[in-house]
Amino acid sequence: MKRRLLTILCLSMLACSMTGCQGGAESAHAEAMPAITASPEETPNETAAEEEKEVPIQVDTDLAIEKGARIAVVAKTTDSDYWKHVKKHMQKAVDYLNQVYGLEGEEQITMTFEGSKSEDDVTTQINTIDAVLAENPSVLCLAANDANSCEAQLETAQENGIPVIMFDSSVSSDLVETYCGTNNLKAGRTAADKLCKAIGNEGEVAVIAHEKISHTSKERVRGFSQRIKNRHSDVTISSVVYRNEEEDLKEQIQSVLEENQQLKGIFCTSGPVAEEVLSVLKDYPDRQIQMVGFDSGDIQKKAIADGIEFGTIAQDTYRMAYETIWAAVRSTVGEKDDSVELEDKIYIDYVWINQKNLDNPKNVNFLYD
């Protein structure tokens, strides 16, 4: 079989549509894709900038993918900037694959995207997965709220021949095809190195984590704690606080600050947590506490620009979305071509964002509004 590997620019897709065309190491993707510069006669705008990004996947159009495949995505939540960006990029990935495979009408790949109102709502997510599986999709893409949940649902999927692609946040199970997302253990280590540098490599720090049961939260806290223990002997983690339903997060953060007057730094394991910590630190202007966040939005970007936040570990939602959808589509080949084998883990690179590189065009994939 002659394989045709395509690495196609979204700009090319745009031009094609205008003319009527139908159309390893810890990461296999070591560098962020560079932005493409618009020609002088083009009018730059946000939409055009997105269309000019290089598509971060290689597509073999000779693969006998399932035509009319239905991809069911169940995210941790639909109610945050991070997940809204993931959804947007996933839909673009679906559209892209339909174009390069020339799929139209009932043969087109389709996607549904559902999630809970909050990342700690495990019950709603389980019920959503049950409902989704009852509709017998071609493949399930899942970002789990609870690392130890979903086993019964994964068994149901396996019994019905539905491949499961984990993304962003995995589960403790062998019943999945692959995991596509950040190496959160490694990201936690990076956060530790950066925060220790910010506080002069000595003193007490705290961790404010988004969930105790989430794979992402567990791995980030574990990586951070291991790094402090192994590399920064003069730094002590005075407390690790997990957001919970019983206590307001703002009050939890205030308690950490009040109980430790010597605290010099805070690591936040998610964007919403980072934003909450920033709102609390406004009430403690004299404490001069250094903070390292996770992900990025307008609030964190402004705090970094103003020198209030030392920096953040920013994930590439663009690449993760495309890689997840492409893995989902490849999983539909399945028994038709046993040469198609998905990687156990597809790690998506993150980047350290601080004042120095906040405005660097190369980091466009890692920042969102």
Image (cartoon, helix red, strand yellow):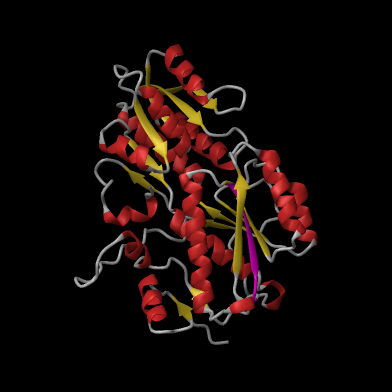
Q: Nearer the viewer, residue 95 or 165?
A: 95
- Is residue 205 at least partly visible in the picture? yes
Where is residue 247, by image quadrant? top right
Q: Is residue 268 above or below residue 215?
A: above
Give me the residue at 67% from left, 75% from top: 338
Q: Nearer the viewer, residue 307 or 52?
A: 52
Q: Furthest-right residue in view?
A: 159
Q: Is residue 80 above or below residue 346?
A: above
- Write the start and end of the magenta stretch as one range: 67-76
Q: Position of residue 272 (x, y in %)?
A: 47, 36
Give me the residue at 61% from left, 48% from top: 115
Q: Furthest-bottom residue in view?
A: 2
Magenta span: chief secondary structure: strand
Find out whether residue 197 is within the magenta segment: no
Q: Nearer the viewer, residue 194 or 46?
A: 46
Image position of 157 (left or right of 320): right
Q: Position of residue 40 (x, y in %)?
A: 19, 70
Image position of 329 (left or right of 174): left
Where is residue 296, by image quadrant? top left
Quarter in which the N terminus is drawn: bottom right
Give me the residue at 69% from left, 62% from top: 163
Q: Furthest-left residue in view?
A: 40
Count of numbered marks: 0
Q: Is residue 110 above or below residue 279?
A: below
Q: Position of residue 26 (x, y in %)?
A: 48, 54
- Is residue 342 at least partly visible in the picture? no
Q: Position of residue 67 (x, y in %)?
A: 64, 77
Image position of 327 (left or right of 368): right
Find out whether residue 74 is within the magenta segment: yes
